[in-house]
Image (cartoon, rainbow, N blue to C red):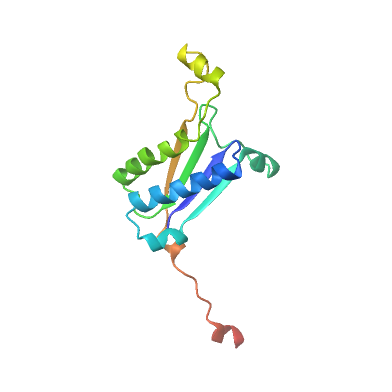
């Protein structure tokens, strides 16, 4: 099942819920999963402040607002492209610029990359997803 990790500079709980819901829908559609597989997806949110506390380095490039890491099986180029195109709209809908930001953008002043999302796709090894079963009979001996 797909694992999604959203790196951001900070989101409200409501924004996280919205993003999670939309990313689940996008994932079900683009990876052609069954509706009952929705509960088997994992979406994790990581903020820069969490990384700072853990001694990590910034994982979001300066020119982007979000980084979305997708870890799954069978990541073909067409799936990556379809996922990216649909997922970008999820983050674009979050962006609600202030009236001053809108005016500044109209005149070409300000960040042209606001709302930009960086994607990282990683193929999930089949060995990782296979269940590990401990033989309790051998442990008792």
Q: Residue at x 48, y 17 (%)?
A: 105
Near-viewer residue (105 or 7): 105
- Residue 123 placed where, x, y %? 40, 51
Compared to residue 8, the image places residue 34 above or below, namely below
Q: Is residue 115 above or below residue 133?
A: above
Residue farthest right in this picture: 53
* The furthest residue to the front: 99
Nearest to the observer: residue 103 or residue 16: 103
Q: Is residue 103 left or right of residue 13?
A: left
The residue furthest top is 107
From this viewpoint, which residue is outermost toward the left?
A: 78
Quadrant of the rendered image containing residue 80: top left
Q: Quadrant for the N terminus, please.
A: bottom left
Which residue lies at the image location 47% right of the left edge and 37% below the top edge? 91
The total number of labels drawn is 0
Q: Position of residue 130 (x, y in %)?
A: 44, 67
Identified at 37% across, 53% down, the residue is 28
**Residue beneath the point at 50% across and 75% down:** 133
User: Is residue 75 shown above or below 107?
Assistant: below
Q: In the rendered view, does 26 fall on the left or right side of 113?
A: left
Q: Whole-percent x and y of residue 139?
A: 59, 83
Whole-percent x and y of residue 101? 54, 19
Q: Quadrant of the C terminus?
A: bottom right
């Amino acid at each position: 099942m797909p694992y999604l990790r959203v790196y951001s500079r900070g989101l409200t709980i409501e924004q996280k819920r919205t993003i999670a819901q939309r990313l689940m829908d996008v994932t079900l559609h683009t990876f052609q999963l069954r509706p009952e597989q929705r509960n088997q997806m994992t979406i994790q949110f990581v903020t820069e402040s969490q990384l700072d506390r853990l001694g990590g380095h910034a994982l979001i490039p300066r020119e982007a607002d979000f980084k979305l890491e997708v870890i799954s099986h069978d990541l073909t180029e067409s799936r990556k492209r379809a996922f990216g195109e649909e997922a970008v709209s999820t983050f674009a809908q979050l962006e609600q610029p202030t009236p001053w930001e809108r005016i500044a953008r109209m005149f070409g002043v300000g960040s042209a990359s606001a709302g930009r999302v960086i994607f990282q796709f990683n193929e999930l090894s089949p060995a990782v997803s296979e269940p590990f079963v401990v033989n309790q009979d051998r442990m008792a001996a």
